[in-house]
Image: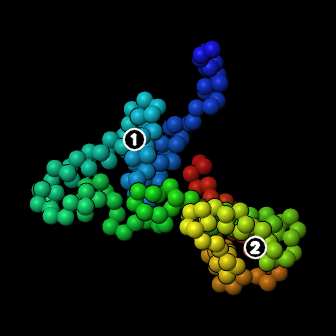
């Protein structure tokens, strides 16, 4: 039986393409054109016209490709990177063409900090145990990406960075005001495009 799924089911299963395109625009602005190409693929898959920002981007690529600078260039790789608008230095972790992994790796830091905070809010008093518990799931994903494990010193550095501290609090009680001050910012780093 090859019945079509009811329209209401299709609507609940289909992604919110416009919202995802907004997210991809922000990522393309912050991290480079890899995400513009993700948006192009998404539009093609869902048979949507390109949003204005994609059309503008492709127009800029066409201008660069047909420029005298491109015609005179001797290094094809550098010229193509310039034509497509890739930065001279790659933004953040990951390569130019594997930004998904770089983005995932980047998101692990605030995720670890959030899980650590939850451990303390739930009453964990042993800071080493809270770091290790919070680090276990993150370490598993990080290991898949990098082939390495995260040691406790690295977890401590991540907490310093995520909570913008010079020194880590020594007790769970000392952590509470820090968590109260910084937790919302960490959640916003995890879900920055949720508006």
Q: Nearest the camera: 48 or 131?
A: 131
Residue 33 locus on image (x, y percent) = 38, 53
**What residue is pinned by disc 2?**
131
The tag on residue 139 is: none
* Quadrant of the image containing the N terminus: top right
Rendered location of residue 118, percent (x, y): 79, 63
User: Is label 1 in a helix, a strand or a loop?
Assistant: helix
| Front position in the image: 74 or 89 | 74
Residue at 47% in and 57% down: 99
- Residue 32, image x and y in percent? 40, 57
In screen coordinates, is 169 left or right of 51? Answer: right
Instruction: Please tell me whether residue 131 is drawn above or below residue 39 in the rendered image.
Output: below
| Closest to the observer, 192 or 96 | 96
Mark 2 surroundings within 10 Å by alpha-carbon count, few (fewer than 14), some (14 through 19), many (20 or more)? many
Callout 2: helix, strand or loop?
Answer: helix
2, above or below 169, in the image: above
Residue 109 at what x, y percent from top left?
A: 62, 67
In the image, residue 20 sits, relative to residue 81, either above or below, namely above
Question: Taking 166 as reference, is 121 left or right?
Answer: right
Dot 1 corresponds to which residue? 40
């Amino acid at each position: 039986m090859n019945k079509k799924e009811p329209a209401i089911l299709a609507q609940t299963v289909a992604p919110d393409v416009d919202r995802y395109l907004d997210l991809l625009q922000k990522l393309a602005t912050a991290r480079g054109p890899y995400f513009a190409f993700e948006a192009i693929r998404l539009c093609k898959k869902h048979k949507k016209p390109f949003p204005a920002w994609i059309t503008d981007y492709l127009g800029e690529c066409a201008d660069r490709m047909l420029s005298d600078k491109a015609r005179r260039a001797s290094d094809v790789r550098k010229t193509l990177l310039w034509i497509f608008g890739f930065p001279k230095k790659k933004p953040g972790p990951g390569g130019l063409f594997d930004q998904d992994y770089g983005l995932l790796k980047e998101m692990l830091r605030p995720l670890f900090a959030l899980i650590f905070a939850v451990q303390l809010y739930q009453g964990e008093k042993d800071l080493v145990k809270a770091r290790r518990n919070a680090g276990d799931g993150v370490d598993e994903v990080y290991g898949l990406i990098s082939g390495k494990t995260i040691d406790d010193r690295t977890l401590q550095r991540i907490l310093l960075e995520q909570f913008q501290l010079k020194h880590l609090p020594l007790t769970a009680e000392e952590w509470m005001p820090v968590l109260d001050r910084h937790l919302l910012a960490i959640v916003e780093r995890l879900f920055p495009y949720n508006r």
